[in-house]
Amino acid sequence: MERIGVFGGTFDPIHVGHLVAAATVRHDVGLDRVLLMVAGDQWQKRGNVVASAIDRLDMVRAAVDGIDGLEASALEIERGRPSYTHETLQALTAPGRELFLVLGADAARNTGTWVEVARCQELATLIVVSRAGDPGEPADPTGWRWRTITIPWLDISSTDLRARLASGRPVEGLVPGPVIELIRARGLFT
Ligand code: ATP
Ligand code: MG
């Protein structure tokens, strides 16, 4: 069996918290690959995304370059309309393949509101990424096959990074070097 993780996000921009989560899950769950699934026009965040889908995809590609087992996926962008998780999991379903849906603890608390959540629960095992010392409620992903993976608390968010970049403050150490180069070369988030 090929074991594939699906880690979705807007990645606007991708940062080291995302990479720590993806790499740790890959190792601890024993996954062959983790796909960083770059959201297209994400319906839950409509109006808030600042970088284009192609710029966000290229940033994710730059970030995972050279990291074993992490890959950027354009599947949702290529769909050309907002994607539901059940559609993405369905598209990735194949004989000989086992799917693992990777979610932050915050997102894992809200799957009850998802479209076709029961279908998602059939198609994938949920991996909840919990940040050590997270003051939030423990996740209770009712209806899922699931397990929790704990990673260090890295208090980094794309929202904060966009604000830092807009005001000209450094993001070194928070964003991978090749991604910073790409941001500067394309003049993103200014
Ligand atoms: P934004 O501030 O725009 O919401 P974000 O930093 O939360 O951006 P997303 O693209 O929304 O990034 O997140 C994608 C996934 O990464 C989500 O599952 C989220 O829980 C997880 N994630 C976000 N920030 C971190 C972090 N610092 N450490 C670990 N996981 C994170
Ligand atoms: Mg977020």
Image: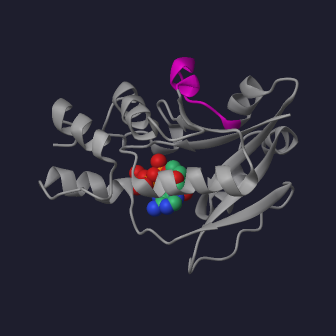
> Where on the picture, by quarter, is residue 36?
top right
Reply above or below: 32 against 159. above
Q: Is the residue 73 above or below the residue 122 in the image?
A: above
Does residue 145 sit above or below 58 in this rendering? below
Q: How is the image coloured?
A: one colour
The residue at 44%/68% (across/down) is 154
**Total tally of numbered discs in the picture:** 0
Image-based side of 83 in relation to 54, left or right: right
Q: Considering depth in this image, is 73 or 64 the residue closer to the camera?
A: 64
Residue 96 relative to residue 115: left or right: right
Q: Residue 51: percent from the left, percent from the top?
A: 31, 35
Q: Is residue 110 visible?
A: no
Res 2 quadrant in image: top right
Q: Is residue 81 visible?
A: yes
Left-right relation of 5 to 21: right
Residue plotted at (56% across, 80% down)? 133
In what quadrant of the picture does the N terminus appear? top right
Residue drawn at (85%, 44%) of the image: 118
**In magenta segment, residue 80:** yes
**Residue 98 against residue 91 in the figure, above or below:** below
Q: Position of residue 91 (x, y in %)?
A: 73, 23
Q: Position of residue 46 (x, y in %)?
A: 43, 39
Q: Which residues are magenta?
A: 74-85
Q: Residue 28: where, in percent of width, then height?
A: 70, 58
Q: Point out the image quarter for the C terminus.
A: top left
- What residue sits 72% from the left and 44% below the top? 31
Residue 104 lies within the magenta run = no
Quadrant assignment, res 107:
bottom right
In this image, 88 relative to 21: left or right? right
